[in-house]
Amino acid sequence: MDNINKINMDDYKPLRDLVFENLREAILKGDLNPGDRLMEVQLANKLGVSRTPVREAIRKLELEGLVIMLPRKGAYVADMSLKDIIEVLEIRASLEGLAAYLASERMSDEDIKKLEEIVDECSKTTDIEELLKKDVEFHEQIFKSTNNKRLHQLINSLWEQVYRFRVSYVSDNNSFSNIVKEHKMIMNAIKNRDGELAKKYAKEHIEKAESFVIDRKTKNN
């Protein structure tokens, strides 16, 4: 809660949307942790707004599964069980394999060059925040190139559910170097228009993250 600051007002967005985006980002980045209670008055004071947009944002976060409402207790940041995480990553592996397959057929030469630039930038950084950013750019480039809006939306909704676990995965030294290598393998398969290979590498990329999370969660329990 200490990392929650007053929001920057944006004339182009309704206040309720700004509050929602601020709280959502705080949850996904781990500034608000699973089990933290979301008290309207305290959050409103922190954000410099009234309770109404905070209440509306909490309701919207509940619909996304990021917040749970407990009878007579209030709103809390939702936790994910190991089973929940595995289910999300299993679906992601299949969908991202499909995305890589479609991208290998549909990605333009210009977009392949952009993908190569992103991979090159990934290989040069040793900063976790920068790699997280480039990781998102890499996958987004692939998702957009599928020209399948519904597939893109489905994958993004799943990404958000496990974002907080991606931070710990990328922070691991072995994972850090492996991610860059795996990106290169996926990129080369797409560049060579080998859909089956791109699909295989993309699925394995997610499955390795799944194995890491299962191992980490099991040790912590």
Image: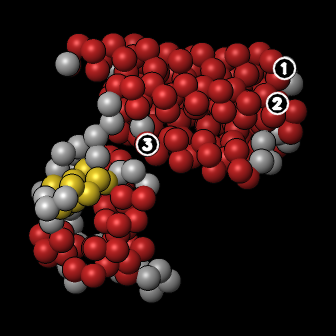
Residue 74, x across and y down, in percent: 17, 61
Residue 126 appears in the rendering: no
Tell me, yes or no, whether the two marked residues, 2 and 1, touch with CB atoms within 8 Å: yes
Report, in whole angstroms, how far the alpha carbon at label 3 lies from the one at label 2: 27 Å
Q: Considering the image in quadrants, where does the N terminus appear?
A: bottom left
**What residue sits right under mark 2 in the picture?**
104
Q: Quadrant of residue 104?
A: top right
Measured Cα–Cα span from mark 1 to mark 3: 30 Å
Tell me whether the residue at label 3 lies in contact with that at label 2, contact meaning CB atoms closer than 8 angstroms: no
Q: Residue furthest bottom?
A: 11
**Foreground: 106 or 27?**
27
Left or right, 117 with respect to 162, comes to right
Query: Which residue is found at the position 63% from the left and 50% from the top?
Result: 153
Q: Position of residue 33 (x, y in %)?
A: 22, 45
Q: Is residue 77 left or right of residue 17?
A: left
Q: Image quadrant of residue 8?
A: bottom left
The residue depicted at 17 percent of the width and 50 percent of the height is 36
Tell me if 204 is positioned left or right of 111 in this view.
left
> Along the polypeptide, which appears first: circle 1 or circle 3?
3
* Residue at the extreme front of the image, as rendered: 71
Secondary structure at numbered mark 1: loop
Q: How many marks?
A: 3
102 vs 203: above or below: below
Residue hosting label 3: 161
Q: Secondary structure at mark 3?
A: helix
Residue type for callout 3: Gln
Provide residue 101's location: percent of width, then percent of height: 78, 28
Q: Residues within 10 Å of mark 1 (few under 14, many from 20)?
A: some
Identify the secondary structure beneath mark 2.
helix
Residue with the mark numbered 1: 194
Residue 140, label in figure: none
